[in-house]
Image: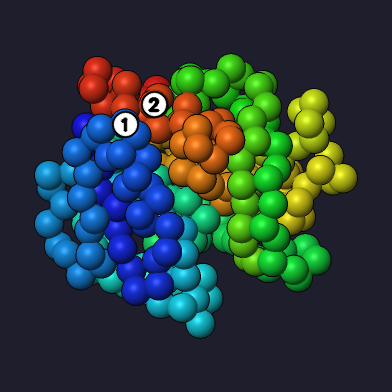
Amino acid sequence: MKLGVVVFPGSNCDRDVVWVSSGLLGCQTRMVWHEETDISDIDVVVIPGGFSYGDYLRCGAIARFSPVMREVVKHAAAGKFVLGICNGFQVLTEAGLLPGALTRNRDLHFICDRVPLKVERSDLPWTSEYGCGSVITLPVAHGEGRYYADAETLPELENNGQILFRYCGPAGEVNEANNCNGSLNNIAGICNKEGNVLGMMPHPERAADPMLGNTDGMGLFKGLLMAVKSGEKVPV
């Protein structure tokens, strides 16, 4: 598997992803400057967290116009994997690769914490290393992570099984008391209909190294690695 990590001006979690991919999993990995226009050598594109272009206009709103994003759209259309983490999730919604939007957190505060997440399905590479309904804990760090979708889109996401992660309590309780940022339906991560594009606000790369005391995020990368190695196609 060759993984490419897109770097915009203001990205700051790019090297964390590189460490997991290259340092911990031993995968061929390269950083992709946002002005690049050839990513044909890459199997998996990761758009990391950070503050692309400072997020001065709206999170991800400027990054979507970077030359590399045209290639990322083509990459996704070809059925290849795209992962957006935190600011990367915001960029994917701005680019139209995922539905909905990320708005200011319910209480208008920046949240930096560890939160439990319920894994909603395990038949996709992203979650194949977890049990369906299992609870994992990942870090979050965002000010605009409240997922929103309109009244037509939200039931489509539910009916299509596009919600992969929800904020929950320690025992998997999905309710408003355990919804850290006010996201609709406690949504923490969604995929596209085809299942090859995933966006999530929590940071799996910050919970992958045993040195950090939590490796719950490593399952996501291992599942992806297994899928790419085996040439597995995601179920539609």
Q: Element under label 1? A: loop
Query: Residue 234's x, y, as percent?
Result: 36, 25
Disc 2 packing (10 Å; few <14; some 14–19; many ≥20): some
Mark 2 or mark 1: which is in front?
A: 1
Position above or below: 102 against 183: below
Q: Which residue is painted at 26% across and 27% down in the image?
A: 228
Q: Residue 14 at x, y = what percent?
A: 37, 56
Q: Toward which corner of the image does residue 104 lie, by quadrant?
A: bottom right
Q: Using the numbered discs, state the Cα–Cα distance from disc 2 to disc 1 in whole angstroms.
A: 8 Å
Q: Which mark is residue 25?
A: 1
Q: In which quadrant is the C terminus drawn?
A: top left
Instruction: Give the farthest residue toward the front.
Output: 211
Q: Quarter holding the N terminus?
A: top left
Q: Secondary structure at mark 2?
A: helix
Residue at 31% x, 63% y is 7
Res. 153 in view: no
Three-letter amino acid code at the position of disc 2: Lys
Q: Is residue 31 left or right of residue 184?
A: left
Vertical position of residue 144 compared to residue 211: above or below: below
Could you tell which of marks 2 and 1 lies nearer the N-terminus?
1
Count every numbered label the image shows and give the total. 2
Residue 59 visible in the snapshot = yes
Q: Amino acid at mark 1?
A: Leu
Q: Which residue is mark 2?
A: 222
Find residue 125 and report its image quarter.
top left
Q: Residue at x 22, y 58 (%)?
A: 32
